[in-house]
Image: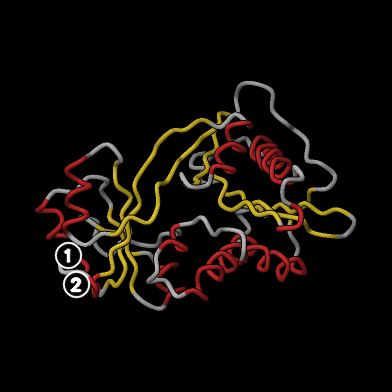
Amino acid sequence: MMSGQSKDPECCQWLDWDSDFFGFGVAQVESKILTQALCYDIERWCQRNNVSCLYFAAAADDLATMRLAEAFGYQLVDVRILLHKSLGTGELPTALSPQVRRSRAEDLPTLKALSRGAFTDSRFYYDEHIPAHLRGELYARWVETSHLNPADAVLVWEQSGVVMGYVTCHPGEAGTGAKIGLLAVGHQFRRSGVGGLLLDAAVAWFYRASVDRVSVVTQARNIVAQRLYQRRGFLVENVSLYYHKWRQMSAG
């Protein structure tokens, strides 16, 4: 999710956006590798900063880290796949389709409604400690935040006056760190090609913004999304194991 200022740069980063949304302290482990000493440092940091939920994106190829995560009460909630596409080579769409436009304030109710049912493969739906009513609402808040951020672009696909889906584009800073955040299509419009067309629109938008590389994250359980990105030339860059640790429920 979205990160804020770190309260302590040594081992964890405090997440302002997530903490504000959930109403309790949320942080992220900075390292992808665990040692026993680091696990105890993390626990002390979380206690000092009143962290209830801790995110940890672990290297998928480190057995010792996996075993330590299990021993210290981290729960596996996702296998995260990071993909990227280079925009400096190959055939790229340079023009936006006439069905694509930037989101407007009057679109927000539709965009938020789409978001509430679109991301059921995400880690928040696979953590029973997250209140059910907040899982979809998190993504509704996310798309609203992106719409209100002038640095981001929320592109919608509209046909016959109906918004069928959207994609959020985050350009990063100075052309680096550009990423696609959310891509959602209404249930009744799925398998109609709208998702691929929105992805093409996002790539075109980044290209016109002089971005030379864009990334996107999806889940190992989301085969449909993986195929979509790969058909559009995105390549797998990294696989990580995503854990949540609820401190009040673990003894690590």
The residue depicted at 49 percent of the width and 37 percent of the height is: 83
Name the residue: 43% across, 67% down.
Answer: 18
Q: Do the CB atoms of the residues marked 2 and 1 lie less than 8 Å apart?
A: yes
Judged left or right of residue 175, residue 159 is: right
Disc number at residue 47?
2
Give the quarter of the figure containing the C terminus. bottom left
Question: What SS does tag 2 mark?
Answer: helix
Residue at the extreme bottom of the image, as rendered: 23
Give above or below for 247 relative to 229. below
In the picture of the structure, the residue carrying the numbered disc 1 is: 43
Determine which quarter of the picture holds residue 247. Answer: bottom left
Residue 98 place in picture, x, y as percent: 85, 44
Q: Amino acid at mark 2?
A: Gln
Q: Secondary structure at mark 1?
A: helix
Left or right relative to 52: residue 117: right
Residue 227 % position (x, y): 59, 36
Q: Residue furthest top?
A: 90
Residue at x 69%, y 45% (from the top left corner): 195
